Image: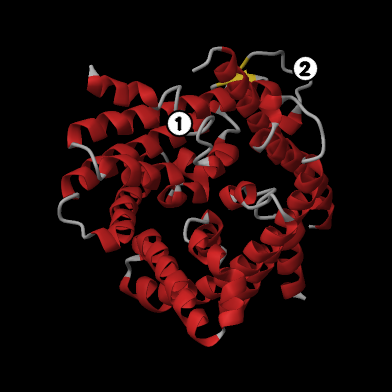
Amino acid sequence: MEFITIIILALFVNNVVLAQFLGICPFLGVSNKVGTALGMGAAVIFVMALANLVTYMIFNFILAPLGIDFMRTITFIFVIASLVQIVEIILKKTAPALYQALGIYLPLITTNCAVLGIALLAITKNYNLLESVVYASATAVGFTIALILLAGIREQLELVQMPKGMKGVPIALIVAGILALAFMGFAGLA
Amino acid sequence: MGNFKHFTNGIFKENPLFVLVLGTCPALAVTTSVTNGLGMGIAATFVLVCSNIFISLLKNFIPDKVRIAAFIVVIASFVTIVDLVMQAFTPDLYKALGVFIPLIVVNCIILGRAEAFAQKNSPFASILDGFGMGLGFTLALCVMAAIRELLGNGSILDIKLVSENAKTILIFILPPGAFITFGYLIALMNLVKRKFNI
């Protein structure tokens, strides 16, 4: 039961992009086409779940026992950056097809603040290992949903006439605002 | 005079938020009030200036291949300092900004300036560049926060400007208001830049 609450909260009520403002850069950057949005979403789900697994273990087995939990920002960012590198190398060797599909999106994830943000938030929420991984995966799926929704709308916007100044980022932000408004309707679920 | 250009560049012409569209996550999240926006701007400026100085001083010692990792370590160290200092001296602001203080590490402005400016220029020019970019970011945050706080809460810097029982447009301090305000501000900036050919 608790897992369902975590998943619904992370997917809709506290949607990572539309309610918590994490990962806005890729949200605006790769939301031009539904295809690229899907690729980015898949890469984020994969890395975010893995990153939370690793950062949870590092925090609880190394940083907390040693009493140096103020080092978490510096350790986590380093772990995430190396993790992305390792995943890239392993995928290239063992699953070339998957690597082809995710390849170009993987390096971009290091700068995705949602990965670091969620790892830090999971620590402050006192989740256990399994809850932490479920939370991360659900959050990443929520990210993907928002990304695909925006990409779908932006594909249609290409065909619409609008003032020159509004083209590109400004109109994407206003569409995101309307999406956020719609997602506020889910607040009643909590 | 040449050096002074590094300073003014970041304020309007290459404003990190409205023109380069970098550092968007904190901009949307913390601009619910001018106090929060100002706090975030100052914290980011401090990290930006300090990391610019360090990276500029160390530029001859950092091997090219691991430079990004080295930059991140420098930036993360200063962010940890800011995090601890704010926790100790401004606990209210620390609570309001929450996870976005440690997230200054992944603020693209700071890594971007390290990569594009500090590793190629002298420490003095890097300080000016850091201050200029930081000031541009802070000003942009304050403008956005002022609009949102005024419309959403009827106040600026926590001073009430409308009568107590006047209705305000609450949506502007909620997430949708952040996206919509930001969208219109970038559009306005595009318009101004084209009108005056800057």
Residue B190 horizontal/vertical position (percent)? 60, 24
Label 1: which residue?
Answer: B137
Q: Is residue B3 left or right of residue A171?
A: left
Q: Residue at x 45, y 22 (%)?
A: B12
In-front residue for pair A167/B154 = A167
In front of the other: B22 or A164: A164
Tell me the crowding category of disc 2: few under 14, some 14 to 19, or many 20 or more residues within 10 angstroms, Cα based: few
Q: Position of residue A172 (x, y in %)?
A: 70, 40
Q: Chain of mark 2?
A: B
| Farthest-out residue, bottom | A94
SS of the residue at dot 1?
Answer: helix
Report crowding for label 1: few under 14, some 14 to 19, many 20 or more residues within 10 A (C-alpha).
many
Which picture quadrant has residue B130?
A: top left
Q: Are discs 2 and 1 less than 8 Å apart at CB?
A: no
The image quadrant of residue B162 is: top right
Identify the image quadrant of the C terminus of chain A. Answer: bottom right
Say what amino acid the circle numbered 1 marks: Phe
Q: CA distance from mark 2 to mark 1?
A: 32 Å
- Report the residue at 57% width, 33% height from top: B31
Q: Amino acid at mark 2?
A: Ala
Q: Nearer the viewer, mark 2 or mark 1?
A: 1
State which quarter of the image contains the N terminus of chain A: bottom right
**What x and y, as percent, mark residue B15?**
46, 28
Q: Relative to B35, is A162 on the left or the right?
A: right
Q: Which mark is residue B65?
A: none
A26, above or below B38, in the image: below
Label of residue B166 in the image? 2
Viewer can see residue A113:
yes
- Res B87 visible: no
Q: Look at the picture and state if B182 lies above or below B154.
A: below
Q: Earlier in the sequence, mark 2 or mark 1?
A: 1
The residue tagged with tag 2: helix, strand or loop?
Answer: loop
